[in-house]
Image (cartoon, grey):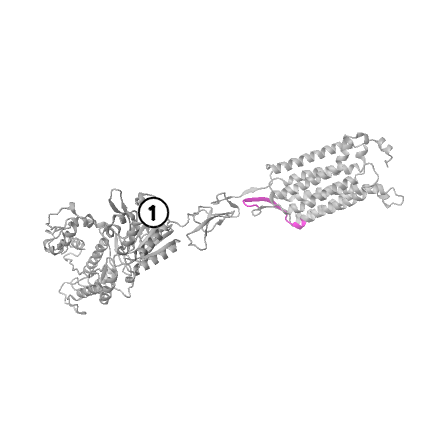
Amino acid sequence: MIFAIEEINQNPSLLPNITLGFQIYDSCYTEVRALQGALWILTGNKETIPNYSCHPSVTHSAIVGEMASRLSMTVSRVLSLYRYPQISYGAVISTLSDKQQFPSFLRTVPRDSSEPYALAQLLWHFKWNWIGIISSNDDRGILSSQELRNEFFKLGGCIAFLETVSLHNSRKSILRVVDVVKASSASVIVVYCSAENLTPFMEMVAMQKVTGKVWISSSSWSVSSDFSSTDILKALNGSIGIAYEREEIPGLMEHLQGLHPATSTDDVFIQTFWEKSFGCYWPASETKLQGSSNKTFCTGYETMENVDVSLYDAHNFSFVYTAYNAVYAVTHALHNLLSCQPGKGPFVNQSCAHILHFWPWQLFHYIKNVQFSNKVGDDVFFDENGDPPIIYNFLNWQMFSDGSSTYKKVGVFDSRAPPGYELSINESAILWFGGYNWVPRSVCSESCVPGYRQSAFEDRPLCCFQCIPCPLGEITNQTDSIDCRKCPQHQWSNELQDRCIPKHVDFLAFEDLLGMSLAFIAVICSLFTLVILSLFIKYRETPVVKANNLSLSYLLLLALILCFLCSLMFIGRPMNVNCMIRQVAFGVVFSFCVTCILAKTVVVIIVFNATQPDSILKKWVGTNVPSYIIFICTAVQVLICTCWLTVSPPFPVLNMSSEPGWIIMECNEGSAIAFWCMLGYICILSGISFLAAFMARKLPDTFNEAKYITFSLLVFASVWLSFIPAYLSTHGKYMVSVEIFAILSSSAGMLGCIFLPKCYIILLRPDLNTKEHLIKKGKLH
């Protein structure tokens, strides 16, 4: 404060022709003396007569102080009655921001309610979500630790333990708290405790050799100044402390080092300062040496070689910067009062106050609205509650192997920065416990990597969880995700389930092994049928071929060729054309094929029953009955398919739900009723054909096909009865494969049962395929 006042008085641009002075009153940390000092300043009389002023012509402008919060509250209650400006450089309790109780109180140090928020931001910056808290057993320690816990909870952190310590704790209770710290998996411990209450606890920590912990200190204590034990200092190595804004004030160090009793005779503190610096006593203080064996007198010729360096370490003084700003705030307010132009003032009738005769409330008006930049370059101002911007420094206590140690500034919290950028940390400058440079971890559970989500335990805090993989089709692309996110309908999760990838498109393609195999079988079967047709054409004059209507055999073989080939329409990428045609073609061709069988059976029945004398079937022999049967029965199926295509034709669709991770391209049948009507009609035709063949199976004929047709239709019925449940229980290309298999197997069954026995006779038993053989048997009609 003295340095700032001397600097101001030497500055011609501040308060020109005005000399700034000061008076100091020591309250000795007691409310009574603090109140007495406030009344003395107000009245100018040590008798402290209220509402009476004995001030000479020189006015006390403002009070810089008190430092302690409880004393500031006592002083401010009196000063506020007169709106007397009071600027504290150390009182942090939040209650003082209440302008109803303390209207003329201001301060240059942030209120304590902002410290838990800054500490919580620091903890979250390092991704520490599992911490312990040690607080002193007093109001400030308990309230501050509770506020820190609330702020930390808002960010998603958890508290492993919250213990209180006190100077008066027994050794057993202190040891219990140390055991809690030692056993906890939390490696970060925040300490909200005064140094005197913390000392017994830290001595026990050092004695128990508790290592691997990062200690985070509040602004209420400092490692270097509050602890002298080397063991404690080693235990606190790597700790991070939050401190009020501390900037190196230009010229202050030189001012301290230039102090000397010979040149500062009017400085009331110089002798005490000299005694503290060099560990000596002035002869006038000889009474202090009584009982001491080291009677060293100060001579004034002491050198800096023997000085206590910490006394000159101005950067680490707790309230140097805030006291400096407090003095300058009063000075700039006085300067603004001095610069007021009559007729443009802020008071009644736009009047101004006189610099040598003004009321306290007039100066308070200027102080609460003051705004300036100090020599460091920081802006100094007060908000509506008389509080400065919230600015904290983060200091790292670094102790080296050679015994040297230092505080290093490693970060800043500045509320003036945009949201989300208030905290700035230089991680590379931090030296953690053990001399490590990497950030320690303090979590209850390790982070869940992308692809996993958190699942909390029922009886443990939210920070303790297990990692569960996301279900198929869901992903997490961030660590510690709470929920998995579903992929869009056209996408699917990859193997790691940390991103969505396009689904595989699938259909029964000719390139697939299954599609290739079915196509190969269809082509081979159709070629085989074509060979049989050629064989029948070549041996068309033989009895085995001529029997049972040669033209119907040709038509049936052609129909079977088409049945085999129509299965190829089910293979390949589903499109509008093939989706519409394939089922219709299958239905019509199969109906034609079954109708040909029915016609062949009817012909056999007519021929053999027409031999009876009174048979009414004689008139149908040699007519076009087979042609009518084929035309009418096939026309009915054509009509069904035409109505199907007209009302609700099949169309291609993308099925995204039947197969996980796949998009199935398939044909939607449009009208399911029409589809099953088409299949039902084929079944009805085959049923009628079966009954007719079954009735004609025992008719006397060497080449009676009825029994072979009966077997073929049994195979046909077995295949299609098995087809229905298989078709309904499969999806995608396998559904198509089931239908193709049914087409091929049923066609092959009819081909084999009806025509292979004849091929056997034609190729292997030609002796049975002669007219002589038939005459010999006497069975030619």
User: Residue 1: x and y, percent?
Assistant: 19, 55
- Residues drawn in magenta: 659-674
Is 80 left or right of 494, judged from the image as shown? left
User: Residue 115: x and y, percent?
Assistant: 31, 55
Q: Is residue 432 visible?
A: no
Task: Please give the residue where the numbered disc 1 appears in the rendered image.
Answer: 212
* Residue depicted at x 51% and y 43%: 502
Number of other residues with Cα within 10 Å of mark 1, as a class: few under 14, some 14 to 19, many 20 or more: some
User: Residue 183: x and y, percent?
Assistant: 37, 50
User: Looking at this rendering, what residue extends furthest in the front direction?
Assistant: 172
Is residue 671 magenta-colored?
A: yes
Is 311 left or right of 752, judged from the image as shown? left
Is residue 218 magenta-colored?
A: no
Image-quadrant location for residue 574: top right
Callout 1 amino acid: Gly
Secondary structure at badge 1 equals loop
